Amino acid sequence: MFFVTGWRSALLINVTRLCKSASSEDTIFALSSGQGRCGVAVVRVSGPASVDALRSMAGLTRRLPAPRTALLRRLLHPHSKELLDRGLVLWFPGPHSFTGEDSVEFHIHGGPAVINGILQALGSLPRLRPAEAGEFTRRAFHAGKLDLTEVEGMGDLIHAETEAQRRQALRQMAGDLGQLYNDWSLQLKQSLAHVEAFIDFSEGDLIEDGVLYEVDVAVSQLRVEVEKHLSDERKGERLRSGVQVVIAGSTNVGKSSLFNILCQRPAAIVSPVAGTTRDVVETPLDIGGFPVLLSDTAGLRDTCDCVEREGVHRARQTVEQADLTLVVIDTAQLPQDLLMVPGLLSRYLKMVLPNRKDEQCLLVLNKRDLLPKSHIAVIQRVLQQNPGLPPLSILSCHNKEGLEDFLTLLQDRIKTLCGDPLASSPSLTQTRHRTHLQKCVDALAQYYQYRDTDLALAAEGLRSGLTSLGRITGKVGAEEILDVIFRDFCIGK
């Protein structure tokens, strides 16, 4: 068992060394700031030939600038000596750089012609080549500057569009999530070491009898912590990808009107003709700092029109996948006897959401302007006496009365679905993490399965759990998932 493990570790170390040496042979360069016209653009160079690039482009024949100090220089083409721009140059000697290698940054004017001129000049130098997508960050990973969770946090920060996404990405990039998984790995390593020591030395009475009991307690506590981390209702993943909010209901209740109000533009066609919306209309929104993908759907009803019937089918599919459904009902559908409103709403909810969960839906009673104010007070009082229904908001898409209260209710529900990214322990943000954590839980269960019958197999369970945790941070078996992680990075990062 030890021989096999040692052989695999040696192979992994050799693969990692090969990757490091291969990545350090070339010097790479790319535009690291955004594409398009801008005041300042940053071109990054990383690798052993960075010093040569700096000397050639900035005309530095003697001393290099002080590390991490901006120096204003005339930037020249290395062969024709044509002036390309005047800009700032910065020198980052390794290992004290982002990639761990010697690195240079050229801060230049952000016009396309200037950027292209600098990039072409760098490309004319020997041993320099354009960087691939995510290659700078990949080198930082190989240099031990970042683990995979921090790399993913950086990618999330680059793509963050809302405040909540930014907070979560910053926390992960700072290493909070990686530290949690590393702490669990350390606990598991200690437990595995104790079990293997017991297997090897227990016959000579060199190991105390209570060591396995300590392992039992540690593994049990770890399993509880991992399972608690997994049972977060996908809050971190939902915040990262966006909350799926769907507007649903029967025809002509004001779904598209509500959709347009939330979008603040005429994104969907509004018509008195029933069945106008026949497909799912989607738009991304920022609601209270949280990312939302809002969907308008076809009105739910039986129809002989084959096109509308397909729209109804798609609407039901979209509702089934929703994180939150806004169930819209028209005040004209309310019974004359307001005491019967709770029963009607229950039946309507069952039609729209056959498998409803109250935390996943909000009731929206539209066309408030057509209701007498006395009726509104009665409806609210009757609903308070029937707590079995989800929260209800009474509003008018026509004059926007009650809209502010609805938006507050909607924002609170979205915040509950995503959670606070800065509260308590760091959130689980990736499906990849969830997969490996579940494998870790299953491996810990194997420990208990064989604990009293075969300690070698029980130890293998702990080793498998340790491997699963290591795959999240990149400590073991990282190569097979590197391409998946880095392929979504932009060139220059």
Image (tube, rainbow, N blue to C red):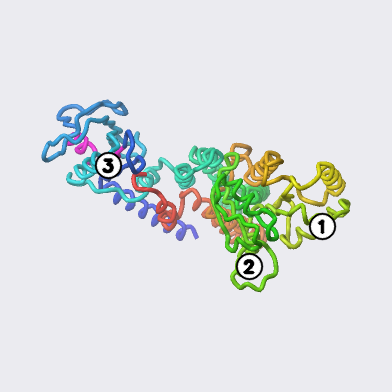
- Could you tell me which secondary element the residue under label 2 belongs to? helix
- Could you tell me which secondary element the residue under label 1 belongs to? helix
The type of residue carrying mark 1 is: Leu
378 or 194: which is nearer to us?
378
Q: Which quarter of the figure has residue 404?
A: top right
Name the residue located 88 percent from the left edge and 51 percent from the top edge: 339
Q: Residues within 10 Å of mark 3 (few under 14, many from 20)?
A: few
Residue 176 visible somewhere in the drawing: no
Alpha carbon distance from label 2 to label 1: 23 Å
Q: Is residue 329 left or right of residue 289?
A: right
Residue 150 visible somewhere in the drawing: yes
Name the residue located 35 percent from the left edge and 54 percent from the top edge: 14
Label pair 1/3, CB-CB below 8 angstroms: no
Whole-percent x and y of residue 376? 81, 44
Whole-percent x and y of residue 356? 73, 58
Name the residue located 40 percent from the left edge and 49 percent from the top edge: 489
The type of residue carrying mark 3 is: Pro
45 or 306: which is nearer to us?
306
Position of the C terminus, as image quadrant, is top left
Indicate which disc residue 344 carries. 1
Provide the residue designation for mark 3.
112
Q: Residues within 10 Å of mark 1 (few under 14, many from 20)?
A: some
Badge 2 or badge 1: first in the primary sequence: 2
Whole-percent x and y of residue 22? 29, 51
Numbered range of the magenta stretch: 42-57
Alpha carbon distance from label 1 to label 3: 62 Å
Magenta includes 299?
no
Indicate which disc residue 313 carries. 2
Q: Is residue 178 left or right of residue 211?
A: left
Badge 2 or badge 3: first in the primary sequence: 3
113 or 359: which is nearer to us?
113
Q: Residues within 10 Å of mark 2 (few under 14, many from 20)?
A: some
